[in-house]
Image (spheres, helix red, strand yellow):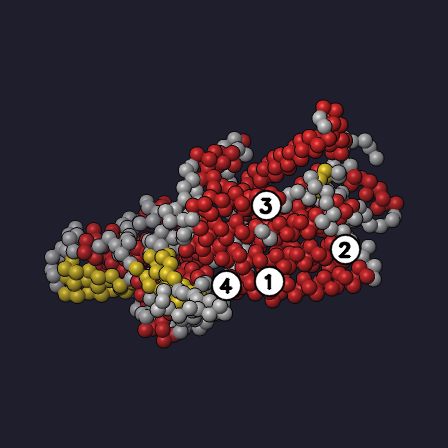
Amino acid sequence: MISMIEFTDITAWIHSLLLSVLTPTWTYIVELALSGVTALVVLLVCVIIMVYMERKVAGFMQLRWGPNRVGPYGIFQVIADVIKLLLKESFSPNRADKVMFNIAPALALCVSLMALAPISWAPGLTMWDTNIGILFITAISSMGVIGILMAGWSSNNKYSLIGAMRSGAQIVSYELSAGLSIITAVALAGTLSTNGIIQSQADGWWILKGQIPAIIAFLIYVIASTAECNRAPFDLAEAESELTAGYHTEYAGMQFGIFYLNEYINMAIVSIIASTLFLGGWMPFHLPFDYPVVQTFNHIMDFIPTWMWFFGKMFLIIFFMMWFRWTFPRLRIDQLLKLEWKYLLPISIVNLLFAAVIIVLHWHL
Amino acid sequence: MENQPTPSPTELRTEEFVVNIGPQHPATHGVLRIEATLDGETVKNILPHLGYIHRGIEKMTESMPYKQSIYLTSRMDYLSAHINNHACSLAIENALGIEIPARAKAIRIIMDELQRLTSHELWWGSCAMDIGAVTPFFLGFRDRERILEIFEANTGNRLTMHYIVPGGVMRDVLPTFVSDVKELLKKIKGYRHEYDQLITGNFIFQHRTQGIGYLSKEQAISLACSGPVARASGVSCDVRKHYPYDGYEKLDFKEVIDYGCDNWARYLVHMEEMTQSIHIIEQLLDNFPTGDFRTKIKGIIKLPEGEYYQRVETARGELGVYIVADGSNKPYRMKFRTPSFSNLGAVKPTTVGLKIADLMANMSTIDLVVPDIDR
């Protein structure tokens, strides 16, 4: 192995530096704050890239340029948008429930950000390396609907209310099959810890090693998580042509901006989880065979740094979600629920059983 | 409170609520207001309210010379401006008993059919957008733009052309007109497979339209529907076939009829009509007549006293122009029977009992143009 500066070296260096000037308790607190701020900054940069990417992808698919005025290739468009949103007045409608109305965006954002805690960004770089990481993420992500329901209900707008109710039905339903496909990967890995799951893919990603059940679980997870993020073709909660803007119809300025940000943060989180579970997170692409050629190949793959693998996989899945959005028409609410309860959920259950059989018989590689 | 029985805990009290869709709403494509009574997601009743874009075109014509009132017809169904002008010009020509040159007839029909193509392409994009796909909108506009370029080059205008006038057309087409249109048709035919790949063959789109928005043949007739809406319900009502004008009787084209009665049938009728329009234009281009583009008529038109009626097939259905003339240079009364107004009646019977999303799908396949409803 060549010697590269690993993230663990940096964190260890910061740790020893802080210990030399502070007491252990204060070191812990400062490290907590530092890691939170770092994760937030990394995520916000990701969101900026995603918003730009979404516009460029949409432009590419729709025979137009996308942003190309602000800065070279329009790369500062997102910043200009944020400034516009910040300068706009945030007002609440006349007979809205003001407290709920103003809390809702913040709550939705907090819930999404909480899911960041157990994510393993790079080897040894996890904010909260707990043994129930995936369980925690599943539990937190099902709370995301509360913010949306609060926003829709407190707006005193019928469109918002319909959008929020749709969103509630949708997220609660799709949570099930997303959870079941997460369990498939967890069963294959034999651990709930995000680091443990990634370590278990050192000799090959689960989508390769886990045979057919892993592939089915991955596809179901991508579909269900697209629905959980309220992205097209499952964007019924917003449904521009039906409900104007759905649950955030009445929001303006940065309050709307937070919902917008929230959508992209959710997208980033579900893609990180999908890549952690099925595509090995930051783990380079390894093949699970013992031939010398394969060993050489695995070594060559190690030369690509882990952060490239991590963000590469994340943006690949995000690109697929954008591709869905700009290609498919929207489903109707009954079709949406039918897809979940009649197709995805039974398939997930059977798939989990199938995976269990494969695990018990050690058929996976 | 005391008079009301307390609801038992097992039985939740629900009530219908009224949602105002429009006048400013992305799905109404204009200022149509629909009062929808909803029970949860299910639409229980629909009440369209008109008048948000009423400009009094019929009344305005009474104070205008005949030639000027043709300008106003472009503003009714702005997506069929040529065809509206055509209807008004035909009514005046019939009243005066003028025969127009063969070249003018050919130009008129080519322009009409190109206009039908632009309208259907825009319809295709906006229909897909109402169902939730955004990309088709841009593809539809791309192809429409090519046709608008031809309009702009030959008539000087893109939306409200006022090119077809009593006696023929305003001015002759460019010398390159035939080759331009031939090239354009080749392009449009090449684009058609994109339409099919993106929307026609899309599983979600098919499920959103098939079996949704049922309008029976009897309902279509009793609501006086016309155009693709009626033809998708199995009613043969193409004015170009039944009351041909300006040489449609000599052309070979099919009246597109589908018996599906649902949104999918309406979609297919629109798509097939585009093919038929291309076919019509190709026949005319192959032997494009030479000669005059307009017969000389007097500067001030005075229709003899009487009542005149002329109908044409616009992109949306049957447009009727009814003129009551009193012998002066202005009409005593001019009445337009516009297709969108009659087709609007089909929204309620197709939608009641379905979901909100189906209301948008139905409105888009019924293809309403709001200024055509209100005039």
Element marked by disc 4: helix
x, y (%) of residue B79?
35, 54
Q: Are marks 1 and 2 on the same chain?
A: yes
Say which chain tag 3 marks: A
Badge number at residue A177: none
- Mark 1: which amino acid? Glu
Element marked by disc 1: helix
Q: Are marks 3 and 1 on the same chain?
A: yes
Badge number at residue B208: 4
Q: CA distance from mark 4 to mark 2?
A: 38 Å
Q: Are marks 4 and 3 on the same chain?
A: no
Residue labelled with disc 2: A188
Badge number at residue A112: 3
Q: Quadrant of the N terminus of chain B?
A: bottom left
Q: Residue at x 58, y 46 (%)?
A: A111
Q: Residue at x 21, y 63 (%)?
A: B322
- Mark 2: which amino acid? Leu
Q: Residue at x 42, y 68 (%)?
A: B6
Q: Quadrant of the C terminus of chain B?
A: bottom left
Residue labelled with disc 1: A340
x, y (%) of residue B65?
16, 53
Contact between marks 1 and 2 (CB within 8 A): the answer is no
- Mark 3: which amino acid? Ser
Q: CA distance from mark 4 to mark 1?
A: 17 Å
Say which chain tag 1 marks: A
- Mark found first going from the N terminus, 1 or 2: 2
